[in-house]
Image (cartoon, grey):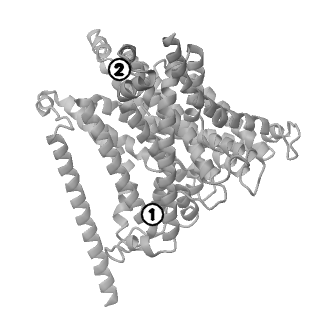
Amino acid sequence: MKKFKFRFSRRAFAYPYMIFLLLFVVVPLVIILINAFLDDNSKFTFANFAEFFSDAGGGLTVLGNSLIIGLVTTLICLVIGYPCAYFLAKYHASNRVFVLLFILPMWVNFLIRTLSTKAIFMALDVKLGMGTVLFGMVYNYLPYMILPLHTTLVSIDHSYIEAAEDLGADKMTVFLRTILPLSMPGVVSGITMTFIPAISTFAISEILSSSKIFLFGDAINMHFSKTTNSFGVGSVMSLVMLVLVIVANVIVNLTSKDEEVKSTL
Amino acid sequence: MTDLLSLSRAAYGWIIAAMVLVIAAEICVIVWLLLRRFGVLPRQNRSELKRSKPSKRLARIFADGYLGLVLACLYLPIFLIIVFSFSGGSRFTFDNGFNFDSYKALFDSEQSAGLLSALKYTAILAASASVISTILGAFSTIGIYALGRRMKKITLTVNQLPMINSEVVMAVSLMVFFAAFSKIFPQGMTRLIISHVAFCTPYVVLSILPRLQRMDPNMYEAALDLGANPFTAMIKVVFPYIMPGIVSGFAMAFTLSLDDFIITQFNKGDTGIETLSTYIYEDARVKSLEPFWFAVFSIFFVVMFTLLLVMNIKRTQKEAK
């Protein structure tokens, strides 16, 4: 009887937070869902979806552009970040402070870093445009790629590599057939951690292209600003973004069963 | 004559800048050596490296060169901003020599008052949001841990939503939610604190949960057997055990809240509340970066990096023990 009572009382600690999550995480998303089906006079309509998917407001074009820029950013981050994480895991795994130096910039406000790079570009007379936006994105998201990659690479059991070497594999084969497949969860997790923020962030493209390049995050921001006030289409865009997030996470969960990679953040 | 003078002043500025750089580098090296001396950093096994084959040494040199290059790219902009915060201008030259004008501007420029109030709000917001989310997170993690399988899974999945969701979507959904219930949630700090708690608490929960899972359930039972009531057992047995998780959860919540821009930007409303990041955005996005901001950014970089390094080194030391 006493045991039942204590179990009950301990569980009760979770209830306030469950209500909190319901109120401030679930309900807001439901409101976005409802909003997507409402017109300006709060009547049910599919017009918002029609407007977005027929590209009347240019929403689809922006999404396309964002996906391309996000993809390129992610690819560059992967190409630069993988060797980084690999060398760190191979030569500096025990040197935590050195590894930390690669992750630290991510904790400095991205606006400050982006504005600093912009100031340098302007001083060097570099024309602001696609190139500078891509640089800014890679500069911002590289740590997010290196971190999960490093975590998986470090946790690879070294005996697998030795086994491959003992069985006569040369260095290239060891890498391609042992290390690379074993680091796939990190790769997938790094890709989502870079790709999702890269397509949805606003301000980076705005600052580094003098508002010439407009990405999906900027579009959502614009639809919800006071001057435009087209919450309906903005809600549809948020839903699209949400679907992308969910798809990405399903992929991550399918490829990696260990939660370690995500929980290191 | 004036030309000559300005030239020499520029040269003078550059020389001092170079000296500052050298001194900074030396300080870094000294700190590095001290850290190794006191065992924070592991000593590298030089002899092993020397004995290895030349091809291996070459690979090692290539790897370190690559890492150095990436590190240089990551830190170059930050470094340049700090160096040229002593130039008094924003054109990355030492035309006016080496001076502290940017730092003087911190106190007497037109943005000073705005910056001060932004700092105040940032501190209040980060402090209250992190304290609330740590308390909420600590108690609810214990509760979640005791939940049944199904409920536990559902709660943890919803708990992950703010972490995986795109920040813009989270910000927008909260904004629409607050607008729909504007009577209950007045504009201003209430909304900001709630939204910050909403995105910080999941991290707190996830930093405490692993520690709780590792705890021997018998410890709690033993406390009960020895006559403690559930509440005393919780305070005297469970909390001390999960304390490291609580502390790191608090640190994470504080940094996240301090660093946030997007969620604050959408939910600050028009009460005139600005945090540091939204104030920077409003002031510096259109204009080019003023010398004033060079000083602000430099201070921010130095404070942030020192804090993070100290925090992480302490943690590494503890883990080593």
Please state the total of marks drawn on the protein image.
Answer: 2
Going by the numbered disc 1, the residue's amino acid type is Leu
From the viewer's perspective, tell me whether residue B37 is left or right of residue A43: left
* Secondary element at image label 1: loop
Q: Which residue is mark 1?
A: A124
Name the amino acid type tagged 2.
Ile
Tag 2 and tag 1 share a subunit:
yes
| Left or right of B223, for residue B129 | right
- Output the chain of dot 2: A
Residue at x 38% of width, y 60% of height? B298
- Looking at marks 2 and 1 on the same chain, the residue that comes earlier in the sequence is marked by 1
Q: Is residue B253 left or right of residue B162?
A: left
Instruction: Work out whether residue A229 can be spotted.
Output: yes
Alpha-carbon neighbours of circle 2 within 10 Å: few (<14), some, or many (≥20)? some
Residue B230 found in image quarter: top left
How far apart marks 2 and 1 lie (CA) works out to 43 Å
Q: Quadrant of residue B4?
A: bottom left
What's the residue at 57%, 39% (across, down)? B198
Q: Is residue B249 above or below residue B68?
A: above
Marks 2, 1: nearer the viewer: 2
Q: Is residue B91 left or right of residue A41?
A: left
Task: Describe the element under mark 2 as helix, strand or loop.
Answer: loop
| Residue B314 disc label | none
The answer to which of A116 and B124 lies nearer the viewer is B124
